[in-house]
Image (tube, coloured by chain):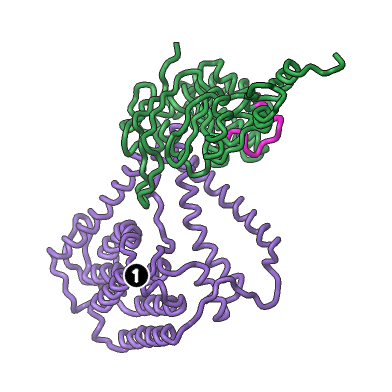
Amino acid sequence: MQGVAIPITMVAGDSYIHRLNPLPKLFIALGVLILSFATRNPLVLGVVFALGLVFVTAAGIWKSYLRVVGILFPISLTLVVMQSIAPAFPRPWTPITDFGPFTIYQEGIYSGVSMLLRIFSMTTFALVMIMTTHPSDLFTSLQKIGMPYVLNFILTMTLQLIPILQNEFAIVLSAQKSRGMKGSGFGAVLPSMVPVFVGAIERVQQLSISLESRAFGSTGIKTSFRNVTMSLKDYVIMVLGVLATLATTVWVIADKSLDWSRTLIFPPTLSIIIVALAAIGFVAFFILAISYVLRA
Amino acid sequence: MPEEKIVCQNLGHVYPRGKIVALENVNLTICSQEIIGVIGQNGSGKTTLVKHFNGLLKPTSGKVIVEGNDTAKKKVQELAAHVGYVFQNPNHQLFAKTVEHELEFGPTNLGLSREEVEERREKAIEFFGLQDLRLSHPYRISFPLRKLVSMAAVYTMRPAVFILDEPTTGQDNITTRTVYRLIERLREEGSTVICVAHDMILLAEVVDRMIVMRNSHLIADASPREVFSDTELMHSTHITPPQITSIGLRWPGFGEKKVLLSVDEAVTAINSSNPPANS
């Protein structure tokens, strides 16, 4: 029953990153997001990813981080496989070698690998931000910089509902297993999903009543129970962070020599190994996941 | 001769997350045709204990034997035919379009023939008085009836032991009485019923053996009469006995201490000890 849930929630701690104001973290995560989409260069993305891991270490959230990556990584591997045989790249494509009935393309494997790195560079920063910030602090900070209240509410409520729904799903699964439900195949979908969704809808309905009764839509200036302060240090980190990501973004767009799609040559054997490993990784994960559900 | 249904030997459980000790060294034997109440404060280990009975939790130390099967080696699905678990919130359990389908889900999972499934469904409908709700959507009927449907859905699997988590919470007097009657009838049919409950009247009038949990330990295993009259025990677990029991214990007119469990008992006791002056 335990361990089924993926905890994309705050991990309690008192690291330097935990104590940082939510805004610098949010802006840096956003900057990295833009930067990751601005380039395909594997070296740049790799460096950003490595930097993200430094922050994961500094925040002391490796355990929770790895649990998310453990699911995300095998799924992302499909990108490498799919891209290699059907690149999201302007033609003409340069074939490297044949892989069974498919052909592996130079541009494809380049784009697959860089997409994988792109996903990991941005999610690492996003996870560090989410896992070290109390949802209420994020809410208060966003409100301070003028985020519309309702929009802000939707965002934070979603973050808070994820763990609740995961918990609910675990309860429903154990209830149905107690009724002899086999944990596999199409037959398991309805019994385990219907109660969760019905419960979620009921919960939202109750939530809206409770919100209304607590003057949710009232106008005027709202105060906050939690007080989030921006220190000079927070400002400096925010400005530096934004400048750094911005400058890097401009550089990677301006410097055409960073486009390695035709110059970073993958030899045929290496390409086959990469694609095969990615395929095996994904299939192994898939089988493991299924057998985990079956065993449970 | 009562048969042993569930045996716990030095059962212990430590939750992996945060290494929280939820159960320690519990020894317990549950026999056929017993009605057992499991009580204790929230967080005392009640739910953790009963979740071991159908394999939802596996012992981290010691053993649980259910009708001769070691639960550590069996899946929850395999134990479902031996022990039925009715969850506190029926919404967590019900999903089908009609009550009939809902009742067929369990026995179908056990791999029974179509005729057998239908026969069990009809028996359950009759036993729980659900004739008018056959084709209703489980989510559209009232909460107390929905709770009965969730019990009926477990009843169709014919387990030897029923675990009812808070069977009377959130129900009115009439449906509460119905549940009491059904628990008695389940026993008459040869089943064992285990209730995790805070409902003192259920515990006093229906249950014949109480298991008291405190801080992960089983601290008492006795009849309701013994448990409720042990003021020290009651105090240490923050449980209030039924009011009629408290009155009986403090009533000076009885001469000796009397442990009363129901209003009827109280009336009889009062009449015999202190006859009204005008009779």
Element assignment for label 1: helix
Give the answer, above or below, for where A248 lies relative to B86: below
Chain B, hue in figure: green
A220 and A14: which one is in front?
A14
Residue that badge 1 annotates: A59
Residue that lies at the very extreme toward the top in this rendered image: B1
Residue A67 located within the stretch drawn in magenta: no
The tally of labels here is 1
Check disc 1 and give the amino acid type. Ala
Give left or right: position of A275 versus A204: left
B264 and B58: which one is in front?
B264
Task: Note whether residue A186 is visible.
Answer: yes
Location of residue A247 by image quarter? bottom left
Residue B247 drawn at (x, y percent) = 69, 30
Q: Quadrant of the C terminus of chain B?
A: top right
**Chain coloured purple here:** A
Residue drawn 54% across and 81% down?
A: A145
Q: Quadrant of the N terminus of chain B?
A: top left
Residue B128 drawn at (x, y percent) = 62, 24
Mark 1 residue crowding within 10 angstroms, few (<14) / some (14–19) / many (20+): many
Give left or right: position of B212 versus A258: right
Residue A256 drawn at (x, y percent) = 27, 86
Magenta residues span: B166-178
Residue A273 drawn at (x, y percent) = 16, 60
Location of residue A246 by image quarter? bottom left
Residue drawn 34% across and 29% down?
A: B9
For disc 1, the chain is: A
Residue drawn 32% across and 67% down?
A: A60
Residue that lies at the very extreme toward the right in this rendered image: B278
Task: Note whether residue B128 is visible.
Answer: no
